[in-house]
Amino acid sequence: MSLWEKLERIDRRVLYGLLWIVVLPVLYYPINLPIVISDLTTEYYNQIEAIPAGSVVVLAFDLGPAGWPELGGMCYASMQHLFTRISETRPNPIKVVMLTYWATGAALIPNCFNEVYGPMDKMGAVYGEDWVNLGYIAGGEVGMSNFAADVWAAKPTDYQGWLVNDATKLPMMQNVRTIQDVYMLISIESGTPGYEEYLRQWWTRKTTLRILVGALGVSIPGVEPYRPTRVQSYLPGGAGASQYISLVGKKVPAVLPGQMGKKAVGVNDALSTSHILVIIFVALGNIGYFLRPRRK
Amino acid sequence: MTMIPEEFVLAAGAWVSVFLTLAVYSFLYKENPIFRFAEHSFIAAGVGYWIAYNVWYCYDLAIGVPGGESGIQAGQWWWIFAFLFGIIYYFVLTRKYFWIYRYSLAIIVGVGAGLTLRTIVQAQILSLILATFLNLSPTDTAGNLIIFNPASPAGASLINNLLIVVLVFGSVIYFFFTSEAGVIKNIGRIGRVALMTAFGAAYGNTIMTRMNLFIGRAQDLLGISGPSPPDQQIAFVVIGITMLIVLFGYSYLKKKPPEEAPAPEPAPKTEAKRPRRKETST
């Protein structure tokens, strides 16, 4: 077997070992490679900055733990950004409704909130008045359709069993009855149901609905054609998450937890070094393919 | 009732998560019982979790909660039909009454198809077509033609829009098989290049996703993030070394030949073919 053929047949375990070697050091000691903010991330950020006072925003956690490593950063930063906007828009603050159409996403909402903010309401946002967590809504696309037509009927209680029609506990929900009351949807998602179902069931009922998507890297080619007519912007995978975290971190440095900022930088560095490794081996594999002796 | 200390819960969670992560990664070495244990646990936990959340949701919605506006408790008796169709879905498990479950299935398929078909043209098909009808002379606010904008490489510009139009057209022509004309073939070749480039980009994005997942888990294993970093670090070392020893041991035992080779079985006797009985006309 020639050297070139060997290059094409490197044992996968060697590659996994090398991956650990290139990722490990930069995770422990980030080299702070520059994070270049893309147009998409800037637009995502600007759209949230431009939410008018008093508007209702739905933040959907349509993901599971399997998508968390890539999308978790977006969840933290989006939630943090929205809560900052709540305090900025007082005395008529924006209202944030959190929900998920993924059963596995239900536990991620309180986890995310607790990890970013510690005890609830630390940001000054009051549960029930400024934000609400509706939790899991079953039915996928059918559930989305129901929610768009009648919010109270689709989800009678919030995640802790409080009635959405109870004006004393959840006063903000008294003005959220159909999709017509929603200004913006931010869907951080790792599959189906996701933005396509939202487009079919929510956007068709309200074509002025602003939609932002936090997408897995693998979903980017699917989202792109819908921008900017249907989807205003999206965060492309882990790179987008790192960019967005750094933008939010500049706006509210006191709020951004140190661990999360470090994590974002670490992810960016590790992504870069691991991609360099992948590029090297793709190049070597191709060189091997073209230079090996051909069988006649 | 005594409460379990939070530190203990966090530590236990760290050890379990590290064990399950390494158990799944052990598949990269080869298929083994530790991986299968983690795989089965994951599926079982996922199914249980999903069922619990859905039952809870159905209870709130269909039976209703005191003071609520939906459900049987609020006088919406028609939810009984939902339960009925839900129950007859279980006839899928019987052979004799299998057909009954088709009524439930028909409703699910019908509702799904109806909801989707009602809106798919407006929300998706039209938008995908419109995304390719681009202005070939995009101008800035001053009215100057934008040939290419380095500040916004993916933004509207003559080069970007022209590329999109030509490559989409070429890709569509590539699937036009009924003509052998040279022009069609050549445009199809451009389309093939466009498709290959798109697949390459999609593959690159897939790699980015997988790398992200790996990096996320690596951060937890190394204690850079997660609920209990010191426990995660100790667990990573202890479980990692133990698992390596077990895996190599398992691999060695699997490779070891049996002490006594079983005696070869005698070759089966071949019987002469019976002469075929002549068919008699009746």
Image (cartoon, coloured by chain):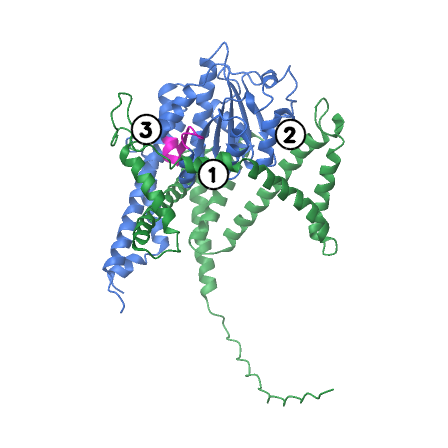
Local SS, label 1: helix
The percent position of residue A189, horizontal first and vertical second, equals 48, 35
Q: Amino acid at mark 1?
A: Ile
Q: Around disc 1, counting alpha carbons within 10 Å, would you say few (fewer than 14), some (14 to 19), or many (20 or more)? A: few
- Chain that bears disc 3: A
Residue drawn where x is 58% and y is 28% of the image: A148
Camera-side residue of B234 and A125 = A125
Q: Colour of chain B?
A: green
Tag 3 and tag 2 share a subunit: no
Point out which mark residue A37 bears.
3
Instruction: Find residue B79 and report its horizontal and vertical position in percent.
Output: 73, 34
In the rendered structure, which segment of residues is drawn in magenta? A227-242
Residue B125: mark: 1
Label of residue B2 in the image = 2
Number of marks in the image? Answer: 3
Q: Which chain is blue?
A: A
